Amino acid sequence: MSFKNIIITFLCLWASRSFAQNIKGTIKSQSGEAIGFANISILNSSNVTVADKDGNFTFDLSKGIYELQISAVGYANKVQKIEVADQALTIDVTLSDNTQTLGEVVVTANKREEDIVKVSTSITSLSAKKIEDTRTWGLGGLTALVPNYTYQELGVPFQQVQSIRGIQVFSENPAVSTYIDDVNNIDILANGFAFTDIERIEVLRGPQGTLFGRNAMGGVINIITKKPTNKQETFAEFSVGNLGLVRNSFGFRTPLVKDKLFLGINAFYQTQNGYWKNDTTGVANADRNANGRTVGGENNLYGNIYLKWLPNKRISLTLNLKGQRDWSNNTGFFVSQANDSIAFANPDKINLARVGQHERNILNSSLVAKYFGNKFTLTSISAYQTIDLSFRDIDFPGIYHSFYKSAIGEKLPPQQVYSQELRINSNSDSKLQYTAGFYGFSQVGYEPSTNLVQEYTPSYYAVFRNKANNLGLAGFGELSYQITKKLKATAGLRYDYERREATFNGVRFDPITFIPDPDAVFANGTFTIVRPDTVVSGNYSALSPKLALSYALNERSNIYVTYTRGFRAGGVNSQKVPSGVRQTFDPEYSDNYELGYKTNLINNKLSIGASAFLIQWQNLQFFNLVAPGTFARTNVGDAQSMGLELEVSAIPLKGLQLDGSFGFNETEYKSFDLIRSNFFTGERIITPIGGNRLSNAPSHTIFFGAQYEYAISKKLKAVVRGEVRNIGSYYTDIQNKIEQPTYTLINSRIGFVYDKYSLFVWGQNLNNERYLAFGSADSSFGRNVRTAAPRTFGITLSAKF
C-alpha cells in the first residue's frame, strides 16, 4: 500500500470516529402523550438541551456510549444509556408520573455524575422537590431527615455545630465540610447561606478525606443550585408566618444566546422575630431599655448571579457570584440561657444585661472552567471568598464587642480565602475510571470569639486580637477498576500539607489575686498595645487513603465495603502559654469502616439504602488545663462511634409516597482525663471522660414522612403531607452532665397546586416540643444552653413559569 493510500485510510478512520452523528429523540408519557420542554443533559458533559413543545430534541454526538438524564415537571427523573455508532440514531424516552415512580438519582460524590446506587458511599440525596416538600430552609432541616445527622447553632446559622455519626466540632474548623457549587466553605463563619433555588443537596456520611480533604471527618454537605439552560424559567415565592416571619424569593434563568450563553439570577429576603423575651430581674448592671425586649430576630438578604458560556461543545465556563447580608438589632449571636434547668422551666425567657446587635456580610465568587475530551474531563475551580463581621453589646455573660484597632463594635478586617482546584476525571465507559487533581487555598482570618474587647467599665476594655494566616496544598487521586462485570475495586490517596500562623495577644491573670492584666487595652477612646503581639506558626500534613470493593447483585442493586479516612487540621492556640508548653496542637483523624447495600425495586417504586459503620476518632482536639490558670486546646484522646443506618422510599399506590430513615449510633470517648482548676483555690480537678457518650450524638434518629397527591382535574391537585421526626437522647457536653432527653417533632404541609401556581399552609413542631438548640460543650465552664424555636406555622404562595 502506498504512503498516500495509508494517509487516506487513516483520515477516513479518524473522520468516522470524529464526525458527529445526529441523534433525534422524542419524550412521551406512559399514556403516549408528548412531554414538552423537558430538560435533557448528557452526564459528565456540557451537552444540555430542552425538548420542544412536542417533546422532540436533537444532539450531535460522536461515536461512543453516553448516559442521558431526562427531567420534566411532574415526572420521575430518568437516566437512559445510548450507544452512538456510525449512523444517525433515533430514540424514544418514556417518563413515568412522579406520583407513580421514584426518580433515578444522580450524584457527584466522586467528583463526577453517577447513579447513586453505583457509588460506594452512604449518601442522602434531596431533590429540589423533596427540599420543597420537607420545607428544608436551612441545614437545620436535615436533622433526622438524614440518619445520624444533627444540627445545633449558637444563635445564628454562621455559628453552628453539624454532627454526622457523632463526629462534630470543638473549634472554628468544622468536622463536616460544606460545599456550595463546588466551592468549600473553609470554616464555620462561612456557613449560613440561604437555601433558595436549590437543585439538589447531597449528604455524604462518614469521612471523605480522599476527594474532599480537610474538615470532612464526619462527612460532606454538597449543595448544588439550579443552573440556567436553554429553557427560560421564572419563579417567585412569598411566605408569611408567626414570629413575624416574612420570606420572599425570586429567580430568573434564561438563554442569552441559544446553546451558547446563559444567565441566572435569584434573590431572597427574610425577616423573623426571635422567640425569647428578655427579663432583667436580678441582672446586675442591666440596661433599663433591655427589659421586655424580644431577642433572637434576624434579617437576611441574599443574591446569586450565574453567567454560563459554552464557546463550543467541549468547553464550559461558569461565573458565579453569591452574596448575603445578615443583621439584627436584637441578636441571638453568642447569647444563651444560664443553665438547662432554667431553660426547660422557662423556654421563652432569657436574662441579658443588654440586647446586642450583629452584622455579617459574605461574598463568594467562583469561576468553573471545564474541558470535555472524548475520554476525560478537565476541571478548574477558582474561588474567592470575603467575610466581614461586627457585633456589639453581646452578653456572653460579660459584655463583649467586636474590635480590632479603632472603635467599639467596628467591623473586623475581612476574612479572605482564595482557593484553586485542578482536576482530571475519566468520562468514558471503560473498565478503568480515575480522578486526580491538586487543591490549594490561602486564608487570612479573624475568628470572632478571639477578636473582641471585654468591657470592664464603659471607658475601659481588655483587647483580644487574633489574625490567622493559613496556607494549604493537596494532591489526590482515585482509581476504580471493573474487575468483572459485577465486581469493582476502588483505591484512593490524598496528601495534605498546611501551614497555620497566628498573630495574637491576650489577657494574663495574677495567680494570687486573679486581677486581669491585658496585653492591649482600649481606654478612653485610645488603643494601647501594652505588650507586643505573639506570632506562632505550625506545619501539619496528613495522608487520607480510601479502599472500596463493590459487587453489583443486578443492574439496580449494589453491595459494598469501604475504608475511608478523614482529618481536621491542627492549629495554634491564640492565647500565650507558659514556656515549655506547646503553643500548637496536632490534627485529628477519623477512620471509617463501612458495609452498605443499595437497591431500587419493583420498577423504581421502592428504594432502600442500608449501612453499618465503625469510626475510630483519634487525637481529639479539646481545651485542657496546661499550666496553672492557663487553658489551651490540646489533643486529649480518642473516641469511637458505631451504628446502623437505613433509608427507604416507596410509592405503594398512585399519589402516595412514603419516606423513612433510621439511624442508630453507639458512641464512646476512650480513656482520657479533663483537667480543670478551682478558680478561687487553684486546686486541680481531674474528671475522667473515658466511657462517656460523645456529645451531640443522639442514640438514634427516626424520620417518617407521608405525602399524598390527588389530581382533582388535569391542572389542579391537592397535596397533603405529614412528618414525624424523633431524636434520641444525647448530652451536649463532653462530661455528660447536660442532657437533652428524647424528643419528637411533628410537621405538616397541606395545599393546592394549580398549573404553575401553588398555595400551601404549613406547620413545624406542631406539638410545640421544647428542646435544646445548643448546649455548652464543656460544663466545667458553665451549663449555658439555648432552647429551640416553639411551634411555627405559616402560608406559602409560589409561581413558576
Image (cartoon, rainbow, N blue to C red):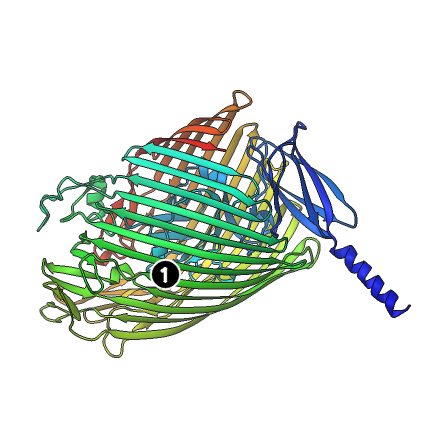
Is residue 765 or residue 591 the one in the foreground? 765
Residue 470 in percent (x, y) is at 37, 68
Furthest residue in direction top, as rendered: 713
Residue 775 in percent (x, y) is at 27, 50
User: What residue would you read off at disc 1?
Assistant: 173
In the rendered image, the vertical position of residue 99 relative to residue 154, given as above or below: above
Residue 734 in percent (x, y) is at 30, 57
In the rendered image, the vertical position of residue 123 relative to residue 5, given as above or below: above
Furthest residue in direction front, as rendered: 257
Question: Could you tell me how many numbered marks the image carries?
Answer: 1
Is residue 126 or residue 786 the one in the foreground? 126
Helix, strand or loop under label 1: loop
Left or right placement of residue 626 versus residue 60 in this view: left
The kind of residue tagged 1 is Asn
Left or right placement of residue 364 versus residue 110 in this view: left
Quadrant where the N terminus is found in the figure:
bottom right
Residue at 70 percent of width and 48 percent of height? 60
Q: Quadrant of residue 641?
A: bottom left
Left or right placement of residue 404 versus residue 417 in this view: left
In the rendered image, the vertical position of residue 198 relative to residue 450, given as above or below: above
Q: Quadrant of residue 514?
A: bottom left
Residue 515 visible: yes
